[in-house]
Every structure is written in C-alpha cells, then in structure tokens.
Amino acid sequence: MLVLAARDDVPARMLADRLGEAAVAAGPQDLSRPGWTYARSIGRRTGVSCRGQFRADGLTAVISRISAVQPVHLTHVSRGDRDYVAAEMTAFLRAWLTGLSCPVVNPPTATCLSGPALTAHQWAALCGRLSIPARPARLTVPAVPDDRPAPAACRVTVFRGRPAAAGPCPAVLLEHGRRLAAHVGAEWLAVTFDGNHEQAAVCQVETWPDLADASTREGLVHALIGSGARS
Amino acid sequence: MASVLRALTRRGAEVVMIDQRAYPTVTGSITACQDGASGWISVAGCRRPVAEFSGYFLRPYPIPPRYQHGLAFHQVAAIDQMMLSIAETAPAHITVVNRPSAMASNDSKPAQLAQLEDLGFLVPDTIVTNDREVAEEFWARHGTVVYKSTSGIRSIANTLTAADLPRLDRLATCPTQFQEFIPGIDYRVHVVGDEVFATRIVSTATDYRYAFTQAAERTMAATRLPGHVADRCQHATRELGLLLAGIDLRRTPDGDWYCFEVNTAPAFSWFQDHTGQPIADAVAALLQHGARTGSAVQ
C-alpha cells in the first residue's frame, strides 16, 4: 500500500506505522528521487520512496493525503522555482493516481489530489440535486459566524460502495450515503445526519478520513485488508 | 473578457462585471439547500439577487499580489470562493462558461490527454518522468521528442536536442512531460456551445504561439473541418463539461488528426483578430440564450 502524504502529516505516519512492512510512504520530497514515471499504461508507472522504487500495478491500495503539492514542502528546490515545481508535481500526481486498479482513498479529481473537495455549500446543492435532505448551507462575504448548533445524531461511513453506521440507522440514510459517495466517485466518505430517523438531513460530509482518530484508522485498515490489501 | 463584454453590450444585454482587482467592493450571501439556492451579490453597493442572472462568464485569475497577505487575502479568498461556488452550483438552465470544476481539467495535461484518448482522439505517446534513463529510452524510441509543462502553467514546447543532454541530470528534481513529435499542420478549434470555429495555422516553429521569438514563420486562416472531426470536438467539449473550449489539433501528412489539449479558458481573441471569426459574438449569444439544438460548423 502507498501512503502519499507530506512528512509533517503525523496521522498519516501513524497509519503507515500501523500498516508496517506492507506500506510504503512517499511525499512531495520523494518526487525528486529519480524513478517516478507516468505513462498511459499503468504497468509503466513507477514511484520511489526511501525504500526504493515500486510499480503502480504492484500496489494493493493508495491512501492519498495530499490535496495538492505545496511550495512549502519543497525546501530542497530553489525558492524561485517552488511554485512552478509544486504545480508540475500536482499535475503529475493527478495523472499518476488516475485509473489505478487498486482502491485509492480517495481518487483525485480535477481540483484535488485526495478526492472531492466540495464546500458545505456545494454539498448542500448536490444533495438538493440528488433529492437527499440537507440542512441549508450559507456562504457570506464578509463571513458571518454560523451560530446554529450542528447536531450529529447518525454517521454513515461508505467504503467502496458499502455504507455502514456505528449505531441504529434507517436504511434510507445508508442509501443516501452510498448515493453521495457514488456520485462523487469517492472510495471513502462519511456523512453526518442531524437525526437517526428517515427524514434526517445531511449536515456534514467528509471525504478525508480522520487518521488521528484510532477507530477511524483501524476501520480503514480493516476495510483495506478486507478489500484484498494486505497488512 | 473585453471582447465578450463588448459583444454583450452590442446585444443589449445587462451585464454585471466583477473585476477581481476591485474585489473589496464585493459582498454577498448565498444559501444552498435541498430545494435549491438563493442569495444575492453586491458590487460597489449595488445588490442583485443571484436568481436574476441567466449566465456567468468566468475568467478567474490568481488573487492579485496586493491582496495576498493578511486580512485582505482572507476577504478576497472568500469572495473568490463565493463566486466560484455560485458558478459551480448554478442550476442546469443557467449558462455557465465554464463551470470551475470543468475548467480544471487541463491543469494536468497528461490526465486530460488520457480522457481525450478515451473520447476517441488520437493522442501523442506521452510520458512524464524524472528518470533520465526513461527519458532517453523514450527519445531513442521516437526519434524526435517535444518537452513541455505538465500543469496548466504556460510553457513553450521545445524539441529535445543533443544540446539538452547535459541538462537531463536535472530531471530528477521534478517530473517533466515528454511527447512524441507529431508532424503536420496545426488547427485550433473553438467550440462555443453548438458552434465550431476552426483556424488552420501553418508555421515552421515547434510552438506556433512563439513563432516570432523562435525566428519562425506563421500564417493563420479560418477553415472548415471534416464533419467527423468537428463532431468529435463537440462531443469532447460536452463530455468534459464545457460550453467553451479551444482544442489543439494537428493533421498529419497521412490525414490523421491528433489532439494535444482542450483549453478550458481559451484565449480566443487572438485567433478572432487574425481570422475575423465572430467567436466573442458566439459566446455572447450563448450566454444570452444557451446552446441551440443541432450543430453549426463555421
């Protein structure tokens, strides 16, 4: 498994440690180790970590924790070139991560390397188009603090199209979660509803697993192992 | 932007111009919920409900340098986010040229090239690598190779030569895009809704956009595409979620048509100035009335 993360991403390091020998960790600095190649054919794509070169078609899963390569992560590059190199590396990774045959949490979109990066406003609008109940999301300039409490009564997590909830949860809410994940192409997605009844509305959507949370981390490890990835 | 604004004005359209350089004068509030979206935008004190807008034309640029620090940056970034969110979530009957997520498709040229190949275009063999040996093997295999930027940052496409050999050790720092050289005549195709405007470019430069800096010649003329090529361009534009696209094609001596890129915020004014094609008028018509059914090839 590949854990793609910046060196200062401590939760990602915790996941990599948990996965042990089965995981290779690579980040922006590693993209300057010779041996990275993108080609249309996945069999010709290669990457490099501190443990050496690896093939994309040999990966059993990818956990992508980089939304875009940032100039701040490129201290080994001359200052005047960092913005350009960051953009080039981001473009490279987007192509490299696209179309892999293994699970990618989460596959890159045109705007984010680690899956759909929608605002609360955009999630609410999407729910509207999919006829999924959602709490209104407001965007104001200048910003106005949202003082409304955000009840979190039911949380549905979807991995590879299979929804699950920790506690009681009507089937319709599981289906809402599954449909949202399918629509945005996310391998992993979590939806929080403001109730655990059938008319509950979406109040938050996450596409970034909180790896600092032990239960989320373990859940992801077991889900990846269950999907065929090894640890 | 200016040419579209003039065209809209000639057509008597009511236009609200939001200039990023004047951002601090912009305020607004938008709300999305399961029943739709509502809200308002205010520019220099003039408030308009978003429901009044029938179309959006986007030419976003990075935040201007004078706003890139402190409180000003956060406010300007918030305005950017609000405007992009309005465009992204506008209902289907609102004409958006183009939605932000669709505009991002060519921020990774190799990723977009893969999409174009899946949509039926011939595309040049392409690798992106920071490995000198891989680059040299690719070069040896294809004989003539071009290198260019991988991201949406504009670069000058150059042919790899022996003079570049000493520089190949610097590849390690950052993966670089290499493509097989495709000989032939360049075509730039602007798809505007249902309309297609094709320009034939003859140049001795590797990158015709920089013909004069490369001491090369260039001629440009409006032309008509074969029907199947025009259809493919329109199909690709729709599949990429775009209403306006600038497509770079090359026709080989054998008659094959290769696609290099679909520009999602094309600088069509330059082509319009050289050929007289009414591209800005077509964009204005699209914003006012949406895409017509059927197709028109010009």
Image (spheres, rainbow, N blue to C red):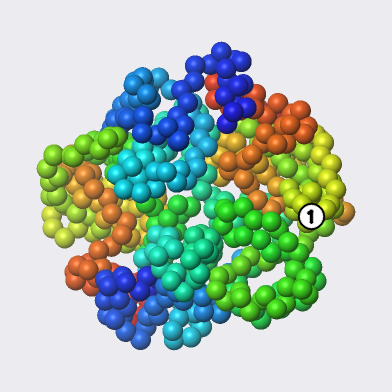
- Height in image: B137 above or below B42? below
Q: Residue at x 61, y 67 (%)?
A: B176
- Height in image: B140 above or below B214? below
- Height in image: B233 above or below B13? below
- In the rendered image, which quarter contains the C terminus of chain B? top right
- Height in image: B238 above or below B6? below
Q: Amino acid at mark 1?
A: Gln
Residue under pointer 1? B214
Residue B198 percent location from the top left of the image: 75, 37
Q: Residue at x 72, y 32 (%)?
A: B272
Residue B255 percent location from the top left of the image: 85, 51
Residue B222 seen from this side: yes
Q: Quadrant of residue B136?
A: bottom right
Asked if residue B227 lies left or right of residue B147, the reply is right
Please report, as a chain letter, where disc 1 is located: B
Q: Residue at x 31, y 52 (%)?
A: A178
- In the rendered image, which quarter contains the N terminus of chain B? top right
Residue A228 seen from this side: no
Q: Quadrant of residue A145?
A: top left
In this view, the residue in front, B127 or A199, is: B127
Residue B22 percent location from the top left of the image: 42, 32
